[in-house]
Image (cartoon, helix red, strand yellow):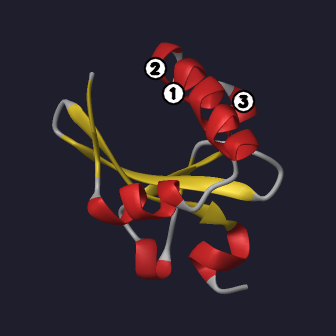
Amino acid sequence: MIVDYHRLFKKDWKHLQPKVKQAFRARFQIFRTNPFNPILSNHKLQGYYGGCRSINVTGDYRAIFVEEMDSIKFLRIGTHAELYGR
């Protein structure tokens, strides 16, 4: 699986606390092994992020990605409120 990161994901990453970065790394390892492991809560998104999917990083943090052929591109990472405006 080829993995890429959108410029907005990279920008979000710079502002994350070290604990959240570590949590993403741990969840990413699970994701590479089994993208639909229940701990990830991998699900389709609607509305603005229609066509994308989201995984749970921590209780409040999510990572949004899109599947492109044989690759994954992470678009954003942030709190539920930051990403979805709620």
Type of amino acid at the residue the image marks with label 3: Pro
Please name which of the two marks, 1 or 2, marks the residue nearer to the observer.
2
Q: Position of residue 13 (x, y in %)?
A: 50, 54
Rendered position, 61 above or below 58: below
Residue receiving disc 2: 32
Secondary structure of the residue carrying tag 2 is helix
Type of amino acid at the residue the image marks with label 2: Arg
Q: Quadrant of the N terminus?
A: top left
At x 70% / y 35%, what residue is drawn?
Answer: 23
Circle 1/circle 2 CB separation < 8 Å: yes
Residue receiving disc 1: 35
Q: Position of residue 18 (x, y in %)?
A: 69, 43
Residue receiving disc 3: 38
Relative horizontal placement of residue 29, taking residue 71 as reference (left or right): right
Dot 2 crowding, Cα within 10 Å, few <14, some 14–19, many 20+: few
Secondary structure of the residue carrying tag 1 is loop
Q: Quadrant of the C terminus?
A: bottom right
Q: Is residue 57 visible?
A: no
Q: Position of residue 38 (x, y in %)?
A: 72, 30
